[in-house]
Image: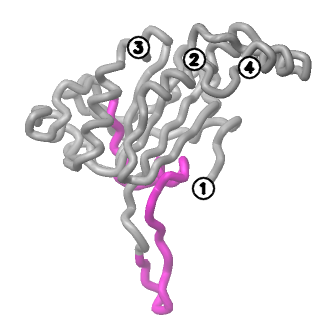
Amino acid sequence: MAVLVGKKAPSFSASAVINGEEIVNGFSLDQFIGNKYVVLFFYPKDFTFVCPTELHAFQERLEDFRKRDVEVVAVSTDTEQSHWGWLQMSKEDGGIQGVTYPIVADTNKTISTNFDVIAGSFFYNENDQLEAEGEMVAYRGLFLIDKNGVVRHQLVNDMPLGRNVDEALRMIDALQYFEKNGEVCPANWSEGKEAMKASHSGVAEYLKKN
């Protein structure tokens, strides 16, 4: 698994569904560089079970992301038509109707591969025929990308394990606090708690108080 933290996020241009209904071509994160932070998260498949709980959970907290100047973008290896169809299904029927942030279609698997969250792999057998091992779908990867397009946090869960949206928000708060104040955020830090100076004396002072 590649560690992308500290590196420029891989660029891409792909079809996506935006505003819950409009299919667009050439969707790219480049539009946010210099203007917005991005939480980019991957999920395995449309029309499944854990995935809609995550997509709805991000939607429910969308305003909390946006007031932090963060755009939320989802990606799976399904087609844009599949995304669109799932968006027309009600929550009660297992659909994701009401989700308004962009959902990107990684149908050629290159985005998931470049972010190194693809579960399967291709190889050539002894007859020089292409085969696949495992499903060519994405693990539950999440990447926090700063305004310069650099990955500052990544998390990858196996498919049965849903993510915690509050933790994604906590990491944004920690990054923005560090950028604003120059102080680092210790274990279990959350907004409103004390941070510390990145020095031996700063650590000692923090541990003494806590």
The N terminus: image quadrant: bottom right
Residue depicted at x 18% and y 34%: 87
Q: Are marks 3 and 4 in contact (CB under 8 Å)?
A: no
As helix, strand or loop, the secondary structure at mark 3 comes to helix
Which residue lies under the disc numbered 2? 190
Q: Which mark is residue 184?
A: 4
Q: Residue furthest bottom?
A: 127
Tell me which label, 1 or 3, sits earlier in the chain: 1
Tell me which label, 3 or 4, sits earlier in the chain: 3
The residue lying toward the viewer, choosing from 90 and 194, is 194
Tell me which label, 4 or 1, sits earlier in the chain: 1
Counting from the top left corner in percent of width and height, residue 131 is at 41, 78
Which residue lies under the disc numbered 1? 1
Give the amino acid at mark 3.
Answer: Asp
Counting from the top left corner in percent of width and height, residue 82 is at 20, 46
Say which of marks 4 and 1 sits in front.
4
In space, the residues marked 3 and 2 are separated at their CA atoms by 15 Å
Residue depicted at x 65% and y 36%: 8
Counting from the top left corner in percent of width and height, residue 24 is at 30, 32
Which residue lies under the disc numbered 3? 64
Q: Is residue 90 left or right of residue 202?
A: left
Residue depicted at x 43% and y 73%: 133
- Magenta residue span: 102-131
Give the amino acid at mark 2.
Answer: Ser
Residue depicted at x 54% and y 47%: 115
